[in-house]
Amino acid sequence: MFSRAYKAAVTVPPLAWVAFFLLFPYLLMFCYSFWSISPATQTIVHSWSLDNYTELLQRPTYWQTLLRSMWIAARVMLFSLLLGYPLAYFLSFYAGKRKDLLYQMVIIPLWVSYLVRAYAWKTILGSDGVLNTLLQYVHLTSHPLDFLLYSPFAVVLTLTHIYTPFTILPIYASLEHIPRNLVEASHDLGATRVQTFWKVIFPLSIPGVVAGATFAFVLSLGDFLAPLLLGGPSGIMISNIVVSLFGAAYNWPLGAAISLGMLVIVVSLLFLSERLEKRWSF
Amino acid sequence: MSTTLTSKPTLLAIRNVAKTFGRNVVLRDVSLEIAEGEFLTILGESGSGKTTLLRIIAGFETATSGELWMGSERLDHEPPYRRRVNTVFQNYALFPHLTVEQNVAYGLRVARRPEAEIEQRVTEALEKVKMTVHAKKKPSKISGGQQQRVALARALVNRPRLLLLDEPLSALDANLRRQMQVELTSLQREVGIAFLFVTHDQEEAMVMSDRIALLRSGELEQVATPREIYSRPATAYVAQFIGHTNLLKADVHGGVATCGSLSWQTSLPDGSTFFSLRPEHIRPTSGAGSNSTVRVRGRVLHQAFHGATELVRVGCADGLALTVRTSIGGLSPEEVELEFSPADAIPVRESPERN
């Protein structure tokens, strides 16, 4: 059908791209994670050992931060689903003529820079920020509430804000795929709206929920800007440690080991979510 | 035009139902009564409004005007889930995430029937449609004909007073379709529930129904038994829609109808009238013939083989062409002489233009 030269011309560039910018860096990181830093010369020693991994497991800072990151990501996932599902449901079933407009309104925040949105929360949550000023103005508090900013709370709030559209879109898509005559059939067989939702609509939207949950969890887990800007000392996440290991702390091998650990977690989650989606798609 | 079977009480009365979508008039003024245990077919072309009428009865659409009565109960004010009416959807609308068994149990589960009763009724319903062996399968794992049976069982297990069927056989291939037509009619007799069946296929309507309601552009043209609707079509449209016919536009003057070179006695008043003359009522002249028949000569234009019979198009002297049904090889290809009895030329009303 197509000549050999044509096939080569279209397949080689993308393969080369993936190899050079994806496989090669991962391979490099994989190698680094087994190397070490010489305490004397502060240079990387190219000798193979599992020391970085044992340090990861032995030093509580690392795995505690990892657990905290997962706990933050889990909360972001939960809140994004709780906010996103009703919105997607309304959009798909009741928005009528305004469907396209409202859909665009879900998309638009994605066009605004992440930094701008994170800074916006800073001005809202700060000790002389919008929220505290308002609360003191209406005499709900006498002092500024200090748990609002530089806390895990601020990180969860910001990440939820940022990643909710990522849960809305797949849920919306899966709701749109439900044939409407199934809803009619359910009513026809005597089911009320509530029964129809729980027995027909929700089970059929599970692939979208799983996809949305995966997006929210994985993206939050690897986030480092929100904890950097809004997290404070108690809101540090695992990516911040990686960033500092590759930067000021100058311990690339340990940073690579943590990154690889996260990669394993994320890939297993993606694998699991794909299995779940398959199990619930028809 | 009678609209009820005199022997049985009325189950559902449709009174002056009209439906418009924006400026688009889908149903004009439909009144129809369905008797207990009756198999009534709403027959019509696509766009005639038949599915809309069904959806209004099921409760998925609201009529713009008119009423639905089930006994002394006003049906059209009830939401779909409170109507004792169930639907078999065109594409079956089986729940893909539930097994065959769970699909059938759905109506009973949402009605919170006791589990023992659900199990017993589901088993019975699956037996009735011969789907017991497939009970644990998902709908995607069974064939179209089997899905059809599950859809039937899912509706009938709730013991509705009226079952609505929206072109349920249209997705099946011809053989399976004929088989299901027979099964469906015998099932209907067995359960004794009134069926309101919607189709665009006149043959299907003729085979299955107690009565046919022919819908055209949102208005009923005729409601009658298959036999009556075939042999006594009320309008030119009905005559053409049901089976084949020759529609003759004749001038009646002094008790004689004239169409081209044809003329015959009639009792109709003077004026222009359409007559429907079925192809099987025209035959080649036999020997001397009698004075009571109308005769015409013509040449065979076209023959279409239909298995047991043949439909032959015969061109007559004055540009008139007649379709004749004959046995195989019944007409020689050249000159033929045909005759028909004036009693078989049925006067029909002209169907007014609508859109």
Image (spheres, coloured by chain):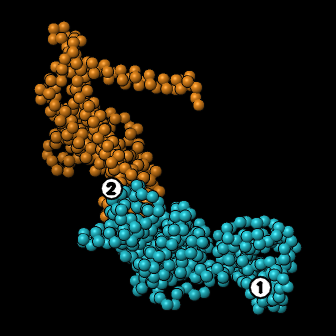
Q: Does residue A4 show up?
A: yes
Instruction: Indicate the position of residue B110 as horizontal and vertical percent values.
Output: 30, 68
Q: How far apart in space, not on screen, are marks 1 and 2 (Cα)?
A: 67 Å
Q: Amino acid at mark 2?
A: Phe
Q: Is residue B231 above or below residue A74?
A: below
Question: Of tags 1 and 2, which is closer to the observer?
Answer: 1
- In the rendered image, what is the letter of the chain coloured orange? A
Q: Is residue B25 above or below residue A100?
A: below
Instruction: Indicate the position of residue B332 as horizontal and vertical percent values.
Output: 82, 70
**Rendered-image quadrant of the N terminus of chain A:** top right
Q: Is residue B38 above or below residue A140?
A: below
The answer for which chain carries disc 2 is: A
Of A93 and A99, the residue lying toward us: A93
Q: Is residue B328 left or right of residue B161?
A: right
Q: Is residue B304 left or right of residue B207?
A: right
- Disc 1 marks which residue? B341
Picture residue at 24% right of the left edge, 39% below the top: A73
Instruction: Indicate the position of residue A28 as horizontal and vertical percent values.
Output: 31, 19
Instruction: Indicate the position of residue B20 as horizontal and vertical percent values.
Output: 54, 70
For residue B173, which numbered disc appears in the image? none
Q: Residue furthest top?
A: A41
- In the rendered image, what is the letter of the chain coloured cyan? B
Of B72 and A54, the residue lying toward us: A54
Quadrant of the image occupied by residue B26: bottom right
Picture residue at 54% right of the left edge, 61% below the top: B173
The answer for which chain carries disc 1 is: B
Picture residue at 29% right of the left edge, 41% below the top: A272
Crowding at dot 1, Cα within 10 Å, few <14 / some 14-19 / many 20+, comes out as some
Q: Amino acid at mark 1?
A: Ser
- Disc 2 marks which residue? A202
Picture residue at 74% right of the left edge, 83% below the top: B345
**Secondary structure of the residue carrying numbered label 2:** helix
